[in-house]
Image (cartoon, helix red, strand yellow):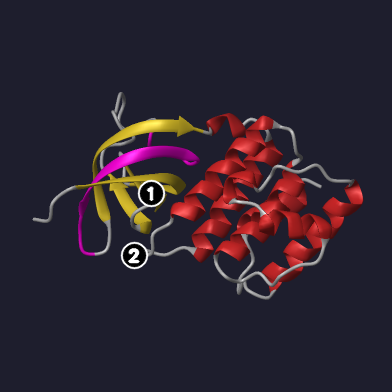
Amino acid sequence: MQDELCVRGIVLSVSLLGEYDKRMVVLTEQLGKITIFANGARRKNSRFAAVTQSFTLGRFHVRPGRQSYTLTGAELERSFLDLTPDMERYASASYCCELMDYFTREGVGGRDELNLLYTAFHTLLEGRLGPRVIRSAYAVKLLDVEGEMAPSEQGLAQYILAQPIGRTFSFQATPHAEEELEKLAQESLRKVLDYPLRSEEILKSLV
């Protein structure tokens, strides 16, 4: 039996299995995107209940298997479930997770990606910027992290690309600049994505 590991990460998505279990996709610093099975997480008073929710940052103790991991312990660091009451912010957080799921894979460390996702969640909660411009800035920065973003001479995009990840959203912008950034993000994503994002359809329905 392989030794247990401790990884730090954010839960990108959760699906229910059987009567009591959960399957999570987690973006981790050390292992990139991995699948973790949390047996008994849906039982009443389960010690895994809080840390096996979407938008949760934690430390996960896991036992490796052939193609996935089994959760053996966990410590919650930060929950972003406060995003859920606001439908647009919830859908925007889901969009960030779905886009991150597209670009990441197991075996490639995800420190920068995890930092970006955490910063996006924090900015969504903060409320200083609107969800729409946060999504655009996030997409541009993620494409840059993944080597898929062409250099930009546009003022706001140029600023975002030049910033360290932790300052991706440290800007103020006019409505026109936000529209230009959104256009650039959408055009850049269309060149890369080969299927539509489910969360994007939800966001369109909220307009």
Element marked by disc 2? loop
Q: Quadrant of the rendered structure where residue 59 is?
A: top left
Q: Is residue 206 left or right of residue 35?
A: right
Element marked by disc 1? strand
Q: Is residue 57 magenta?
A: yes
Please name the residue shown 35% across and 57% down the image. 34
Q: Is residue 50 left or right of residue 88?
A: left
Please name the residue shown 48% across and 32% down the image. 79
Bin the neighbour count of mark 2 within 10 Å (Cα to Cα): few under 14, some 14-19, many 20 and up: few
Bin the neighbour count of mark 1 within 10 Å (Cα to Cα): few under 14, some 14-19, many 20 and up: many
Q: CA distance from mark 2 to mark 1?
A: 17 Å
Amino acid beneath label 2: Gly
Q: Is residue 132 magenta?
A: no
The count of marks equals 2
17, above or below 139, in the image: above
| Residue sticking out furthest to the top | 45
Please name the residue shown 8% across and 55% down the image. 1
| Residue sticking out furthest to the left | 1
State whether residue 53 appears in this view.
no
Label drawn at residue 107? 2
User: Mark 2 or mark 1, which has the lower sequence index?
Assistant: 1
- Residue 132 place in picture, x, y as percent: 76, 47
Q: Quadrant of the rendered structure where residue 38 is?
A: top left
- The one nearer the camera, 44 or 72, is 72
- Residue 202 place in picture, x, y as percent: 69, 51
According to the image, label 1 marks what residue?
A: 24
Residue interval drawn in magenta: 51-66
